[in-house]
Image: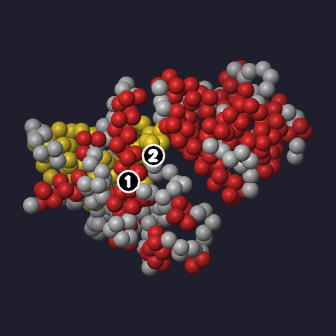
Amino acid sequence: MPCTESKSIHRKLPQSLREGTLGAEWDASQETMPGGRLPFLAPDAVAESCKLVGFEEEAIPHLQSAGDRIAADQDLMRLAWHCHYLMCHSGSYTRSDARSWPSLEDILGNWEGAFYLLIALSGVPQARAFHRSRGIPARVARDTYGDTSLWARHYKERHGSWGVDTYILPWLFNHLSGDLYRLVRLQFMQRPFRQKLQAFRNCVTREVKVLADEGVRYRGDGQLDGTGGESDPEAGWTSRLLIDQGCVIGTPIHPTGIALSKAVSLPLDEWERILAPGDPIIEVHIPAGSRMDFDACGESFRQAVDFFPRYFPDRPFKVFCCGSWLLNTQFQDMLPPNSNIVRFQKEFYLFPIFSGGRSGFERIFGRDIRDLSTAPRDTTLRRAVLDHLQAGGYLRGGGGLLFAEDLDWGAQVYRKMMELRNL
């Protein structure tokens, strides 16, 4: 349906516009809406943002046409400004709520994805201003913006036109809010520590021990109870953590990624707490789009150790933390020891995380695989995963910590600490 036929955006959109997550702060956004065509819908602005995030030339006229269609309808333009306001200007809106924004297919047809992609691109000028204020190198900024084009290409592969789905909008605005940066192969995002773990370092030997918080339920195999849909009422157990009389007594997490039921005692005059829930950390994310080269990942960490203290001295952090399907320790049994995935895992102090039974499946095979018998077996990873699943296994995720002090990429520092302790 042509945009020019729209009479009332409130009439045409679902009731969720007023009652759901998209309806928040409507009056506040409309009071701040500039007159005339919205700046981020102007053809020149669209072209500039497209080039900054690395779109192919063919994407530019498509998105400029989408901007023209929105600008021709005052109600759609009001909606576009409202979405932009929530993601870029509201001080209280929870960006993750954008995942449940309503479909606009009845109004825009196959231009729906382009509408939401223009909302993502509307944050680029603000991001550029922030990056310039911090002195972020232009190369880093360009590499960071590039994730938007990656997701837009995924959308084009599925739908045949340039756009994004609403579920990815909150992720893209991490790039545009100054919290996330891509350095070489990996992405790094400033966040509070959200795991139920604490870490301690020996003041003399510099060894690290990670303990579970109080009251976490584990299976007999050391994984979180319920991971992959599997519970263990017979052999399962609950963690403990007690700080009393100058020592901490708690459930240790082995560096290979399993919880151990036998508690350890750490004298606090010998062990310093270096990480607790809520502490500022740098989350590590592994974007799609290229092979996971081991040396490139090491260079990412080396640059990150310099980058964040240099450009964000006001935001100190405690540790690099990664939670990913790529840290699934099952891969150490499925893949050769020299695989990039296995080598990557062994650089971290690994820990178990809760996950379902198909963690990473879509990243490995895509979203359209329903029948394992028809899934492609064209890579070592795909063959190993299919053999594992067809034998009745499941896929879990995993977590890992890497303290800047311990960065010696390729040395498997935490495993060496473990080996020295066992001598």
Badge 1 or badge 2: first in the primary sequence: 2
Check if mark 1's residue and mark 2's residue have beta carbons within 8 Å.
no
The amino acid on which the numbered mark 1 sits, given as a three-letter code, is Asp
Q: Name the residue under label 2.
A: 184
- Which residue is located at x 51 percent, y 37 percent? 139
Counting every numbered tag in the picture gives 2
In the image, taking residue 70 as reference, residue 199 lies left or right, namely left
The amino acid on which the numbered mark 2 sits, given as a three-letter code, is Val
Query: Where does residue 287 sit, x and y in percent of width and height?
Result: 50, 51
**Residue 217 visible, this angle:** no
Q: Marks 1/2: CA distance?
A: 10 Å
- Which residue is located at x 62 percent, y 32 percent? 123
Q: Name the residue under label 1.
A: 295
Asked whether 239 or 295 is in front, the reply is: 295
Q: Residues within 10 Å of mark 1 (few under 14, many from 20)?
A: few
In the image, taking residue 238 as reference, residue 137 lies left or right, namely right
Q: Is mark 1 on a helix, strand or loop?
A: helix
Query: Where does residue 374 sit, x and y in percent of width and height?
Result: 60, 77
Where is 26 relative to 351, above or below?
above
